[in-house]
């Protein structure tokens, strides 16, 4: 057995790890702008988001360095997707930033290194939670695979019931080529 076969698998430097770091650099910049256009409770939320992204950025930089790579430095400025003039614009930007950083972490969550997958999953969860805190509504059903910012409507329970012709005359599942629909269960297994 060779020495390399006994070492844990480490993801190569580059690719998704670099893109996650780039997303964090951009998020830190954007949160600086967001903080500059808010006050009070919104400013406190912006400061918390800034600090969280800065900590994740530093964590990713350390991971890249540990793997023998050189972490990319942030750009001196970043082009924002729209002008941020008032607090409502800042909130909109914060939601967008969190969604885009979540997308970067979703890519990293597919890495073969379990430690990176865990970091990515936790970071994506944090981003989704922050986005919801800024704007408490369900947006894209799958971040990164959105429908141009359209809201995702959760279907009402009635919409999930099986079609009336999907069972036989005796109430058993029919053979019309459709699969039988399971009965909705009570909340919390009751």
Image: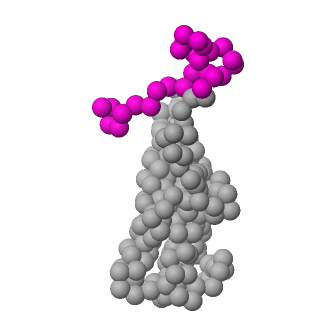
Colour scheme in the image?
one colour
Q: Is residue 161 left or right of residue 38?
A: right
Asked if residue 7 lies in the magenta stretch, the reply is no
Total marks shown come to 0
Q: Is residue 102 above or below residue 111?
A: below
Residue 12's spot in the image, x, y percent?
59, 49
> Which residue is at 54% across, 26% downward?
181
Residue sitting nearer the eye, 19 or 132: 132
Residue sitting nearer the eye, 37 or 156: 156
Magenta highlight range: 164-190
Q: Is residue 36 above or below residue 26?
A: below
User: In the current view of this chain or complex, which residue is farthest to the left?
Assistant: 190
Q: Is residue 44 left or right of residue 28?
A: left
> Which residue is at 53% across, 88% downward?
86
Residue 188's spot in the image, x, y percent?
32, 37
> Which residue is at 33% across, 32% downward?
189
Judged by its main secondary structure, the magenta piece is loop
Quarter of the figure with the C terminus? top left
**Residue 104 in sight from this viewpoint:** no
**Residue 147 in sight from this viewpoint:** yes
Residue 127's spot in the image, x, y percent?
47, 61
Residue 25's spot in the image, x, y percent?
55, 72
Q: Is residue 14 above or below residue 169?
A: below
> Which residue is at 57% across, 44% downward?
110
User: In the current view of this chain or complex, which residue is farthest to the front?
Assistant: 169
Asked if residue 170 lies in the magenta stretch, the reply is yes
């Amino acid at each position: 057995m060779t020495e390399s076969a006994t070492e844990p698998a480490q993801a190569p430097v580059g690719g998704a790890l670099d893109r996650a770091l780039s997303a964090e650099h951009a998020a830190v910049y954007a949160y600086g702008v967001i903080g500059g256009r808010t006050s009070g409770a919104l400013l406190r939320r912006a400061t918390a988001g800034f600090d969280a992204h800065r900590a994740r950025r530093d964590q990713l930089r350390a991971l890249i360095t540990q793997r023998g790579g050189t972490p990319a430095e942030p750009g001196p400025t970043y082009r924002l997707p729209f002008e941020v003039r008032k607090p409502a614009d800042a909130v909109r930007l914060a939601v967008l930033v969190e969604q885009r950083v979540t997308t970067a972490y979703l890519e990293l969550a597919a890495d073969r290194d379990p430690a990176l997958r865990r970091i990515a999953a936790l970071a994506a969860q944090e981003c989704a939670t922050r986005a919801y805190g800024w704007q408490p509504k369900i947006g894209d059903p799958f971040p990164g695979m959105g429908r141009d910012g359209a809201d995702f409507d959760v279907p009402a329970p009635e919409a999930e019931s099986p079609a009336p012709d999907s069972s036989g005359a005796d109430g058993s599942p029919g053979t019309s080529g459709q699969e039988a629909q399971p009965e909705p269960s009570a909340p919390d297994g009751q």
